[in-house]
Amino acid sequence: MKFLDEYRDSAAARKLANVIARTVTRPWTIMEVCGGQTHTIVKYGIDRVLPDCVELVHGPGCPVCVTSLEMIDRAHAIAARPDVTFCSFGDMLRVPGSHGDLLQLKSRGSDVRVVYSPLDAVQLAAANPNRQVVFFAIGFETTAPPNAMAVWMAKKRKLTNFSVLVSHVLVPPAMTAILESPRNRVQGFLGPGHVCTVMGCGEYGPIAERYRVPIVITGFEPLDLLEGVLRTVTQLEDGRYEVENQYSRAVPPKGNRQSLDLIGDVFEVCDRKWRGIGSIPLSGYRLRDDYREYDAERRFDVDRIETEESPRCISGEVLRGLKKPHDCPAFGQDCTPQNPLGATMVSSEGACAAYFAYGRHLEVIRRQTPALSATDG
Amino acid sequence: MTVPATPILSEGFGSCPVPMSRYDQILLGHGSGGQLTSEIIQRLFLPAFRDETLTALEDQATLALPGNRIAFTTDSFVVRPLFFPGGDIGKLAVYGTVNDLAVGGAKPLYLAAAFILEEGLPLKDLQRVAQSMRAACDEAGVRLVTGDTKVVDRGKGDQVFITTTGVGSVPPGRNLSIHNATPGDRILVSGTIGDHGIAVMSVREGIEFETVLESDCAPLTDLVRVMLDVCPGIRCMRDPTRGGVSGTLHELAAASNTGVKLTEASIPVRDEVRGACEMLGLDPLYVANEGKLIAVVPADAAAQILRAMRNHPLGRNAAIIGEVVSEHPGMVILRSLVGGERIVTQLAGEQLPRIC
Amino acid sequence: MCLGIPGKVVETYREHDVLMGKVAFGGVFKRVCLEHVPDVAIGEYVLVHVGFALNRIDEAEARRVFEFLNEMDQLQELEEVPP
């Protein structure tokens, strides 16, 4: 497949890894922001081909992981209604709320459907006028244009049975929150490639400047990530802190004009609660007044549902790179991929799920080689 | 429910008042053991299968079995949609059970089929399923000799559920088992992976594709015969259905207390399946297959077995995808395209399309 | 948020007054909304996320990392030449 295969070439990857090894003179801690980037790193074992002194810390860029417990509970309340067909991206189905997940609701008779695209949900609404079709509009800025388009189309087609449950989150405020933490260890960022195809790179200059961190907007294939790391460590070694665009084949520096216009038309910035982190000001989108009639929270009167995070789940600290999964007392005991307490264990690129598998591996090695058990991995 | 316009008088007083003529849907009455049940059997199932043991309609089929070891297996089929590119629930129900017998080195001989039908199922769909099963039985060289039908209320079933039970004969000295895998053995796959699961997904509402992707549903008996002729010492074979290749390899690693090492570059995947998986964020290792097998073979026989497979119509894309190792018992490790290794985790549940 | 895959535009059409396209992903075709890449030409590649084209793929920029790697190769050859 063009524009994919060539970025997975092993000879090229080895070359980049060698150049990185020759470039670094001391340890560096870099955070990749997007869940999709984490996925590639784990899938291809990228962190294993990097020199040991380059540490990759997984960031909070997984909208599944950071959707607030409140919002999940509101989703469940809506999905449980007999007149509702609740449509969602596949990722969200196993995320636990206060009382189970959407899959369990489905097993008890609720009409919960996986859709590939928000536009499919609009089609469903048009084809089933006697059902209330609700779409769970989560995502970072990347998903804002398709979600906005769905609402815009529903309005254009005058559909009265379509609404969206909006839980958009924005990357720059999240990065700032991480950098503001006194325990922050991140020295450079692999920036969010697909967010920037929409938004452009402009928002990251002020962050790089203020916190003196290099930000390299990076893609999602192995060569992208390796090149992103190379550019970041080169800046770090040089003492520079600029924004670079590694993913230039897909990211126009000013973003996509039509998308920005539509987003501005349909959404406005608002405060948002991030699961495990808490409320971050001006870190989300909600529907503007002109589109408020499509807001599922209003239509189904669930905007007053409030919840408290479980004190046991430390997803928030893991998401900010402050703690590792095995620092959590519930990790591997009460909290496993089969019985997740929080989203970082459910999501396929959640740090906890990844560590759960890796941790077991380490344990097996430890048991086989007793001499090594003195040194902890 | 539509009742035909020409009513025919039913026989006798007190029998089922619904006219005994052709309906176009399954009614509750079809499951009650009376005239409607008889009609379904006589007019739909028996003509579809045309088997003399089945037609005898005894409560049981009495069969002659060669040898003194039989292989015995059962499986239920609940696939939705009922009809998908490359197959249907009936074909799956026959080949699925045949293959479970075949991969144990047995010669599949007889099948039983139990149907649970939902009230409202169009009869023409049931007919289509039955005819498909007959064709599959012929292709696989097995006979459907006994069956059962029940009907459940509308809304209490998913149109058709089929359970098939199969019996086959095992030649003396044949002892294939997943407990036999030994470090050093090679792991072979008979062809491209993920075809069936993606074919079914591609016609599912909300995810439809505009390309026809066909399921790889097929009977493996003959391919297995060819492989065992070349190397009677094959350790074991499995068909990687639910849970995909990953599921099967995890079962193998756990049962034989060995580890599995896979090489991503060796795993054959069709372009269309690859494109679909990239788009939906799925990993072909977890996607269901139907007409494929995994074989664990002694290292020195691997090349020869591979050649024999590639000469067979169902093994054209066969490949060696990995090996059995003594390290990390119970775990499956994959060497990725770019050289780094990762653990192939076991799925907690069904693999769903993702956006992240 | 992140799963964006390059696909080749093979057909475009309008539906409910929105620009749509048939896009190929290595052998499978899917309907994709092209409303935000209105100038896209047949045969060009777009980045698709949840059935929506976010942007066009720039071929020239796509080659850049490989040109860089080539330069690295050439440098290495130079370095290997004995003084």
Image (cartoon, rainbow, N blue to C red):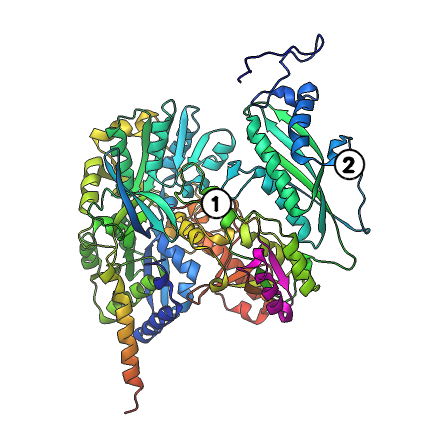
Residue that label 1 marks: B199
| Residue A222's disc number | none
Which quadrant of the rendered structure holds the N terminus of chain A? bottom left
Residue that label 2 marks: B61
Left or right position of B174 against A341: right
Q: Which residues are magenta?
A: B292-318
Q: The numbered mark 1 sits on a residue in which chain?
A: B
Residue B294 part of the magenta segment: yes
Left or right position of A11 against C41: right
Q: Residue at x 49, y 66 (%)?
A: A376
- Upstream in the sequence, badge 1 or badge 2? 2
Left or right position of A256 against B191: left
Dot 1: what SS? helix
Please say if A150 is above or below B95: above
- Can residue A321 be seen in the rendering of this structure? no
Where residue A180 sits in the image (x, y, percent)? 26, 53
Where residue A32 sits in the image (x, y, percent)? 33, 57
| Disc 1: CA contacts within 10 A as few (<14), some (14-19) or many (>=20) | many
